[in-house]
Amino acid sequence: MNYKKTIIILVLALLLPMGLASCTNDAANENKESKNSSEEKQASEENKESQNNSDEKQASEENNKENEEAKNNKEDSNNEGKENEEETGPFEGDIPIGFELKSYTDDKTYKLSDYLGKDAVVINFFGVHCPPCRMEMPELNKVYKEYKDKGLQVLAVHVGNPGEDEEVKRLISENNLEFPVIYDETNEIVFNYGIRQIPVNVFIGKDGIINKSLIGMQTKESYEAEVKAILEKEPSKSETENEAESDAKNEEDNSKETDVESNENTEDNKED
């Protein structure tokens, strides 16, 4: 009996350490797996957070870019509107408001823009039933014939009512008017230039800027004085002409530099 107990005790003594070692290994493996799982989870969360930060940064940059573009577009639009407001008008110092009207005699269309910046222009607003208008017409015609070859253009705009075509044509014929007489069917140009009484004469220089606007009848002398003034204005230069002048100046400067270098080399050779 004692012998059997002894054998059992020995067997238990042998098996117990093995069981403990197995438990220890299992626990270690579990801890290791748990640690690895925790590390993988942490790495995944870090990657996810990094991706989110990257996405947020990209979205923020795109929003900033869109806001900047919208801001620039708005500024360009405001500047363009401001420039347009400042560029044209019916007053002294303004670029005159453009128009495109037909002639009473030859049905030809005349555009103000065809003459701006090249010729001096007189816009004469008149009415066929206006005595002062009829009186100044021959005087304006004399000045036109005298200065048209020097760059003067006259555009007479009739301010009146529908059905006066024949009377206007008779006025043109009686006075042998050589400048175009055009009609504003809708009175749009009359409105744009603020014409409230006639006659009105708008004098535009060769630079394309309104030099003066006079209300009331003019004489040959007063016309001539104003025409001389607007003929003296320098024509405005196109972008192509400005570039050509700039290129010519650069070429001249380069030529001067080459001459200086050549002279210096010549002097050095003499000294040698």
Image: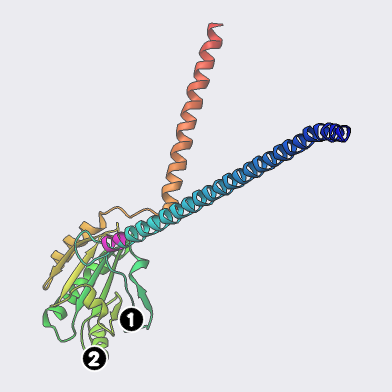
The single residue placed furthest to the top in the displayed view is 272
**Quadrant occupied by the N terminus:** top right
Give the residue drawn at x 22%, y 70%.
142
In this rendering, is residue 215 above or below 59? Answer: below
Secondary structure, magenta segment, majority class: helix
Q: Is residue 22 left or right of residue 93?
A: right
Label 1 CA crowd tier, 10 Å (few <14, some 14–19, many 20+): some
Give the residue drawn at x 24%, y 86%.
168
The single residue placed furthest to the front in the displayed view is 1
Magenta range: 82-87
Q: In the image, residue 256 lies at what x, y percent? A: 46, 28
Q: In the image, residue 239 lies at what x, y percent? A: 42, 52
- Reading the image, the residue beneath label 1 is 103
Label 2 CA crowd tier, 10 Å (few <14, some 14–19, many 20+): few
In this rendering, is residue 234 above or below 204? Answer: above
Q: In the image, residue 158 lies at what x, y percent? A: 23, 81
Q: In the image, residue 51 lies at what x, y percent? A: 57, 49
Count the numbered circles shown. 2
Q: Nearer the viewer, residue 26 or 145?
A: 26
| Residue 235 showing in the rendered view | yes
Give the residue drawn at x 34%, y 54%.
236
Asked which secondary structure carries label 2, the reply is loop
Give the residue drawn at x 48%, y 50%.
61
- Reading the image, the residue beneath label 2 is 164
Q: Find residue 73 and report its image quarter.
A: bottom left
Q: Which amino acid type is shown beneath numbered disc 1? A: Ser
**Quadrant occupied by the C terminus:** top right
Q: Nearer the viewer, residue 29 or 63?
A: 29
Q: Nearer the viewer, residue 121 or 21?
A: 21
**Mark found first going from the N terminus, 2 or 1:** 1
